[in-house]
Amino acid sequence: MNRLWLVLLVIVAIVVGTLLWRGAGPQETPTLALVDYTSEGGPDGVAIVDLNPGSRTFGEILQRVAIAPGANPHHLYYNRDGSRLYTTALGDHALYRITLRDERIEEIVPLDTGSCVGGEDLYFSEDGKKFYLTCLGSSQVIVFDAKSERMLSSIEAPPPNEPYFLHPHGIDADEGIDRLIITNTISLKLDNPQSALTIIELSSGKVLSTHLLAKDPSVPSGPVEVTFLPDRSLAFVTNMLEGTLWMAIWNEQSKEFKFKLVDDGGPRGQSWPLEIYPGPDGNLYVSWAQPGLVNVYNLKDPEAPRLIRTLPAEPGAHHIAFSNDGRYLFVQNNLLNLEKMNAGTISVLDLNSGRPVATVDSFIQQGLQPASLLLLGRGGGRGY
């Protein structure tokens, strides 16, 4: 009998201790993130999830708002001042506006994008007057009035014209030099891969030049994303099919870019580099979908980046976000639900140590695949 009582006391102590531990100390404030997603057999949509491991609701999908089956939302963006939120899409509509109220999604409505097919990336002008949408399927860059959200013009330069662009995806600008760069990537059907960048005069929309960006001109390299460093006329480009990171360096005298190979992931077994993020620590963070990781490059000399560490994620490592307090790095792991690049999770890493802290699998558990990731309230017009 004494032994039975002892066992019961131990069980009670464990239960009470667990309850006290869960309730001990102040719970941290949730870190709310927007995640657009595709669904297996249901409507695609946008969700709000808590990514703070110290929060009581960590990992929970706190709200889901459907768009439509096959909408295929693709990339979330706040505009330059953070007053409006959008997601591009690869389905019937190329662009949606998302209205928020009190940290909740109120509505999601499609915008008129004319003949645009396959909305990919957005660029918002520094003065807040215009924004630009790349259209992968119709090979256009649509220019919008930012206030009315009405189309102003369409930039097009199909081959065999020279210069040209085809299947544009990534887009970014340096307004100080009046240049917009777009990547020529691949078709919506994931065929007809390209290997070039196109330079456009931002103020006029004039297509200025097209440049091959590949180690081997005979093998498609698939430039996918381009990102200028803040306050510097230097852009980084990921070649997803070639597995390389490049840079475009502006020459003020010649008014042209020179291109330089920065890193080749092949010898390390790394491929499909995707998104490019200047980090809060001054380093450059680049996601690599296979095997699923984030490479960090020191930018002490911006024209000679140095790989300093590799952070673990999961297959399909794609969009990245940094917590406001600088503690965590969040990585959305899925690229178009492609085989071996569709873990469907969100990795939470300690930014200081680089070690995994937790994994959010709420989406994959509900038959959903996260498409992109953006912290709630994080403006700036660059999707991060």
Image (tube, rainbow, N blue to C red):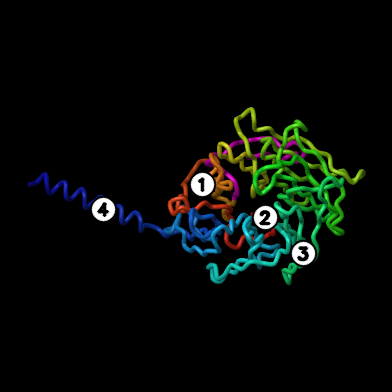
- Mark 3 or 4, nearer chain start: 4
Q: In which quarter of the image is residue 259?
A: top right
Asked whether disc 1 touches disc 4, contact meaning CB atoms under 8 Å apart, the reply is no
Left or right: 362 in relation to 137: left
- Mark 1 or 2, nearer chain start: 2
Q: Tell me the SS state at disc 1.
A: strand
Q: Tell me the SS state at disc 3.
A: strand
**Residue 354 shows in the view:** no
Quadrant location, the C terminus: bottom right
Q: How far apart are marks 1 and 2 (CA)?
A: 28 Å
Q: How far apart are marks 3 and 1 (CA)?
A: 34 Å
Pointer 1: what residue? 347
Pointer 4: what residue? 15
Badge 1 amino acid: Ser
Say which mark, if any, is on residue 118: 2
Asked whether disc 2 touches disc 3, contact meaning CB atoms under 8 Å apart, the reply is no
Q: Which residue is drawn at 81% across and 47% down?
A: 198
Pointer 3: what residue? 130
Mark closer to the observer (3, 1): 3
Q: Where is residue 349 in the image (x, y as percent from the top left)?
A: 52, 45
Q: Distance between the residues labelled 2 and 3?
A: 20 Å
Q: In which quarter of the image is residue 100?
A: bottom right
- Mark 2 or 3, nearer chain start: 2
Left or right: 70 in relation to 261: left
- Mark 3 or 1, nearer chain start: 3
Q: Tell me the SS state at disc 4.
A: helix
Q: Residue at x 78, y 36 (%)?
A: 260
Badge 2 amino acid: Gly
Q: Residue at x 74, y 62 (%)?
A: 131
Q: Distance between the residues labelled 2 and 4?
A: 53 Å
